Amino acid sequence: MTVFWNKSAETMPSNELKELQGKKLSALAKFVYENIQFYKKKFDEMGLKPDDIKTADDITKLPLTYKDDLRDHYPFKMLAVPMDDIVRVHASSGTTGKPTVVSYTRKDIDDWTELMARTVMAPGITHKDIIQNAYGYGLFTGGLGFHYGAEKVGATVIPISGGNTDRQLMIMQDFESTVLTCTPSYALFIAEYAKKEGIDVSKLALKKAICGAEPWTDDLRKTIEKNMQIDAYDIYGLSEIYGPGVSVECEEKDGMHIWEDFFIVETLDKETLEPVGPGEEGVLAFTTLEKEGLPLIRYITNDVTILSAEKCNCGRTHIRMKKVTGRRDDMLIVRGINVFPSQIEHALMQIPGVSGHYQIIVDRDILDSLEVKVELTPDTFSDKMSELEKFSNDIETKIFNILQVRAKVELVTPGTIPRSMGKSQRVIDKRTKNI
Ligand code: DLL
């Protein structure tokens, strides 16, 4: 039997949903015009008045918002409320050394919790479950996002955070966790580790996993399901739009429901950014209908997917998105963490003696690996011959401090990284484009 957190909202007829979106969008247009200088300027430049926005279809009249706009207003200049009203801040990697910062009012946290409660229950999880939450706690939205939603549902939450796989498995056995929440690559790693340690997964109480924060294929799902003997569900979200809880798969495992009473979702042509319809591939853009702290209009996620407005057997009426099949920019996701090549360059350029030639190699064995080949200037290379290891450790630390991802640094002889006459290929992603 399908379980719901908020059945009336989740099964609201599509026409009612659209009408509700129209009302909320019209109020949002006024709110951002009056409270965010950035949007006021955009509206004025376009000759747009808040009163022009009356229905959900008027969304296309509104300006687009890009990640760079957030960067330009780092950290708090795009807030619609005074800082006194902000109760929490999260952040994710940005295109430069600076993170993308997102701020929440009390109402935003309550709304996010509502979204996460729906998201936890959609894959059939209830207050009876014991949820081992192995998403990272901290500035990353995964840990706390899940935590609040799972508690709201009344489930037992184990706030174990990521890493320390021995302890994960001990807790999983001793506390009889029934649900694991973590990135798909970590779920796969836990399965491999359990096998290596001789743990019989069929004896675990674990039944389900909710995995997301990075792209994964249906093939990987099957492997996780087989190796852990569980059902695994996809969850999508991004910090700018609360975090996890933007969409999730229900028990049908056929696309992720996007909570349309909180968001207007569009898919836009990858080149022109003109709207494309359901069934056509495009870049996801979200408009937040309830956010107070940092409301966003037509926020370009750069995630590419297809929307499906077809009826779902679970009874939820909210539109579904298929798996994310790629990104429109150069962001890499390494073990669930967003990595921009420009951040690595930024880290390298702070170290005297490092030349401008480097190469980033991403691969996947069980977990993603990140390797950076770095050329030193010829002088430094000969000077530092005796202390190359220390030098590469210093670079690794610098990269870790900026990215929070461990990279293996290999110092190479000057002149060995291929030079290019045109665009250099700085990033080699060996993970089969399996998304
Ligand atoms: O990854 C929020 C999250 C936490 C989602 C836990 C799911 C579970 P960010 O760190 O801001 O937020 O990264 C957002 O990650 O734009 C996508 O490119 C990617 N992403 C997130 N979920 C999925 C998914 C969190 N299920 C960026 N499939 C997004 C593919 C995903 N990509």
Image (cartoon, grey):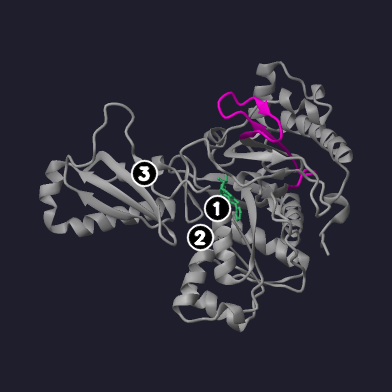
Residue annotated with mark 2: 185
Residue annotated with mark 3: 428
> Which disc number belongs to residue 4?
none
Q: Are marks 1 and 3 in contact (CB under 8 Å)?
A: no
- Mark 1 to mark 3 CA distance (whole Å): 18 Å
Q: Is mark 1 within 8 Å of ligand 1?
A: yes
What is the three-letter code of the residue carrying label 3? Ile
Residue annotated with mark 1: 216
Q: Mark 1 or mark 3: name the one nearer the start of the chain.
A: 1
Q: Are marks 2 and 1 in contact (CB under 8 Å)?
A: yes
Residue 121 falls in image quadrant: bottom right
| Magenta span contains residue 269 | yes
- Mark 2 to mark 1 CA distance (whole Å): 8 Å
| SS assignment at label 3 | strand
Q: Report whether 198 appears left or right of 272.
A: left
Q: Mark 2 or mark 1: name the one nearer the start of the chain.
A: 2
Residue plotted at (43% across, 43% down)? 97
Residue plotted at (70% across, 51% down)? 254
Q: Is mark 2 within 8 Å of ligand 1?
A: no
Q: Report whether 95 appears left or right of 357.
A: right
Q: Position of residue 233 (x, y in %)?
A: 65, 59
Q: Position of residue 98 (x, y in %)?
A: 47, 43
Q: Is residue 250 above or below residue 353?
A: below
